[in-house]
Amino acid sequence: MTSPLPPDDATGSRSARTWLDELPKVELHVHLEGSISADTATRLAIAHDEDPASALGLEGGDYPRRYRDFNHFVDVFVATSRQVRSRDDLAMVAREFALSQAAQSVRWTEATFTAHTLVEQGLQPDQMWDAIREGFDAVDGVAIGLIIDTVRELGPPAARRTLELVADANAPIVALGLTGIEGSVAEREFALLRTGADDLGLGLVVHAGETGTADNVRAALDDLGADRIGHGIAASRDPQLMARLAEEGTILEVCPSSNVTLGLVPSLEDHPLAQLIDAGVAVTINSDDPPFFSTTLTGELAHAMRLANLTPADIIALQRRAITASFAPDTVKQQVLDELGFADPAPASAGLR
């Protein structure tokens, strides 16, 4: 997807594009396995003696530009995740992810990771955590916390196994998560995640109102006490829920290109981001599974500026909101807030809208 931002001009003056590239950023909603590029997935498949074309569901050597539906995306995502079979595989994925975040000036990231799935694929838990730490630690300039999720359709047994893995982990875990197909299992069946998060001193993030309805968002809040809502765009169809979210200051982790590429919203121009902002809902902007949706965090912020007519100062405010709503250590929060305090709110060249 192309960015609405102008390129640097021939004289080398600092442009809007450069400003957004260099701005210190925070990302709260991105999946570690969803960061695997098609090229990396292909290399892994070949290394595992598989035919990438049949094993990965690629189209012309890349991920689909549009998915038939959410289940189609899940199939491609799972096929890619299945290629991560060894400690070295995972360390490489973690390192490449950290490099991509650092290249975008992302200072703090909260990456969702489905640990239960990789253990089921044969990775030993201690090797899994070691590999992630090794990959993250290999890259300077970015700090990453993990949100360990459980998948709805796998039910409470998988959630219990996830809690066991987290309790024994030597890893930078900051929260638990609930992902997967909304409506497959009721949110209230995962109350153990709220209890477990409280016992472990972690946050809880629930994907809701993505493929589901406003009622899924309400259930995430009322039945699970979610600290943040992943996606939540279904709230735009319910004025009462939007008013509640605005009043309570509930954070929605909005991912525009993801919603469009999955066919949940017809186009970026039809995305309800501006509607949510106008209603006073506390949104943040995120990339979700960037190579799967042909995007980056920088690209998503550029789309947000155009779609919601945001100014550079608004984008800085969004980064401040994101780090404040994060589960980062207080020292990291303060470092990012201090750095944002010195950010130039006005690029030298043309406006960013």
Image: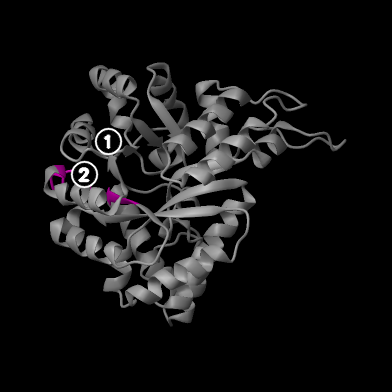
Residue 45, picture quadrant: bottom left
Residue drawn at x 23%, y 52% as measured from the top left: 199
Compared with 131, 234 (above or below) is above
| Quarter occupied by the C terminus | top right
Instruction: Residue 96: give x, y in percent of width and height.
Output: 55, 63
Determine which residue is flagged by label 2. Answer: 182
CB atoms at circles 2 and 1 under 8 Å apart? yes
Q: Which residue carries the number 1 mark? A: 209
Farthest front residue? 331
Q: Quadrant of residue 28?
A: top left
Q: Amino acid at mark 2?
A: Glu
| Amino acid residing under circle 1 | Gly
Q: Nearer the viewer, residue 10 or 318?
A: 318
In the rendering, at what x and y percent does residue 205 appear? 31, 44
The boundaries of the magenta stretch are: 175-187
Residue 89 in percent (x, y) is at 47, 74
Instruction: Answer above or below: position of 347 versus 177.
Output: above
